[in-house]
Image (cartoon, rainbow, N blue to C red):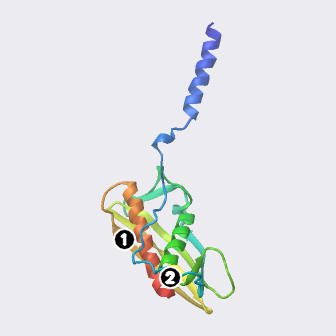
Amino acid sequence: MMKWILPVTLAALLAACSSSDDSDKHYYQLPDLPAATAPAPAATAQVAQRQLWIEHVGVADYLNGTGVVYQTNDVQYVIAKDNLWASPLEQQLQQTLVTQLSRDLPGWLVSAQTQSNDQEVLNVTVTGFHGRYDGKAVVSGQWTLTRDGQTLTQPFSLQLDQPEDGYDNLVRTLAQGWQQQAAVIAAYVK
């Protein structure tokens, strides 16, 4: 009788150790924030006069993982293991940028796919998109707009106060910073 107890016990222990407890994991998606300004009324059968192709939104390597990033001091960053992006951060940033620029640029066709040869092209590199030890949320990087053979490159660096502690509030504050930067980009595109 003792011969089968040891193998069964070992198998049960191995199964318990190998199963991961996902109940402590939290997944985050950037929220769709209300437009900062009132959207223009939709016109029926309106044809977009101008086109903006968001060719690429890239993030720094340390932001490219699944964990939300938090800066613990002036030189150290922690990538969360239980507070994760629900989908890749690059993808979320590009999708929300398309949505926000579409709102801010009425009469424009804003797309993540090329539409024609006669379009403006936007590329964005995000070097900071994280929380910080002093209660700030950091959104930084640079964007490049190419129009009529001319290229404009503009750096950006936002440090927003996070109203409350916690990852939920951090993600909301980061989304607000991204929306603010989208409004700046829209002003240049116009």
Label 2–label 1 contact, CB within 8 A: no
Residue 76, relative to residue 144: is it above or below?
A: above
Q: In front: mark 2 or mark 1?
A: 2
Q: Is residue 129 visible?
A: yes
Local SS, label 2? loop
Neighbourhood count class around disc 2 (C-alpha, 10 Å): few under 14, some 14–19, many 20 upward: many
Labels 2 and 1: the sequence-earlier one: 2
Identify the residue under disc 2: 105
Q: Is residue 159 left or right of residue 59?
A: left
Residue 91 screen position, x and y as percent: 57, 65
Q: Residue at x 45, y 85 (%)?
A: 187
Identify the residue under disc 1: 159
Residue 73, relative to residue 12: is it above or below?
A: below
Of residue 25 and residue 73, the one placed in the foreground of this image is: 25
Say which amino acid is labelled 1. Gln
Q: CA distance from mark 2 to mark 1?
A: 25 Å
Residue 111 screen position, x and y as percent: 60, 76
Residue 28 screen position, x and y as percent: 47, 55
Of residue 53 and residue 166, the one placed in the foreground of this image is: 53
